[in-house]
Image (cartoon, rainbow, N blue to C red):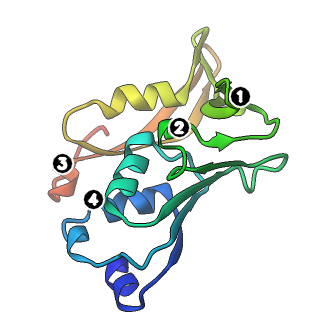
Amino acid sequence: MQAQLAQQHRATHTLLVSVQHQRLMAHPDFERFDLRSFRVKFSTSAPFHAALKADVLSRWPGGLNEHYGLTEGGGTCILAAHLHPDKLHTVGQAADRHDIRLMDEDGFLTLHHRRKDLIISGGFNIDPSDLEAQISNMQRLHDLRLIDELPRSAIGKVLKRELRDAWRAAGRDVQGA
């Protein structure tokens, strides 16, 4: 496990994507490793959910900096989460972007979605993050990825989805997922 190597080498910094943070925090042995050598953890490449940021801050010593938009071109958002624990629902302070977002009075950004990700189906505008939030509430759901859109001339677009639940994790085949 990466935490074992970090403990062994007394790591001080790491750069991970949010799903790597999530998997490390969910590992059953995470608490047994001494990670006090960490000064800061960085996250990049994807929005980092507030609850996960809070978990990283509470159980993994050192600061947490989220960098969003590094490869998008045109601007970057940065959140020093350990300095702004009341802004964990945001991706930090940002330059002008093509995202649909809400900015609070302090200039912190809450990412809503990207215009290019908006799905138009049957005359409705569908925000993938809203759809993901609804589907994620399903029992036994462990992971969700909206993979692609399939063009449909009559209604617009239909989402192809991949769900991995407890049945699949137990090695059972899931039909129709």
Q: Is residue 97 left or right of residue 25?
A: right
Q: Residue furthest front?
A: 83
Q: Amino acid at mark 3?
A: Ala
Task: Give the Cα distance between marks 3 and 1.
Answer: 33 Å
Q: Residue at x 42, y 60 (%)?
A: 21
The residue where tag 3 is placed is 166
Q: Residues within 10 Å of mark 3 (few under 14, many from 20)?
A: some
- Residue contact at pointers 4 and 1, CB within 8 angstroms: no
Q: Residue furthest bottom?
A: 9
Provide residue 73's location: percent of width, then percent of height.
82, 50
Q: Residues within 10 Å of mark 4 (few under 14, many from 20)?
A: few
Q: Residue at x 45, y 42 (%)?
A: 49
User: Dot 1 lies on which element?
Assistant: helix
The residue where tag 2 is placed is 87
Using the rendered image of the protein, determine whether residue 117 is visible from the camera's viewpoint.
Answer: no
User: Dot 3 lies on which element?
Assistant: helix
The residue where tag 1 is placed is 115
Task: Give the Cα distance between marks 3 and 4.
Answer: 15 Å
Asked which quadrant contains residue 148, the reply is top right
| Mark 3 or mark 4, earlier in chain | 4
Q: Amino acid at mark 4?
A: Ala
Q: Residues within 10 Å of mark 1 (few under 14, many from 20)?
A: few
Provide residue 108's location: percent of width, then percent of height.
65, 34
| Mark 3 or mark 2, earlier in chain | 2
Task: Give the Cα distance between marks 3 and 2.
Answer: 33 Å
Q: Is residue 68 above or below residue 139?
A: below
Which callout, 2 or 1, points to the residue nearer the camera?
2
| Mark 4 or mark 1, earlier in chain | 4
Provide residue 147's location: percent of width, then percent of height.
51, 43
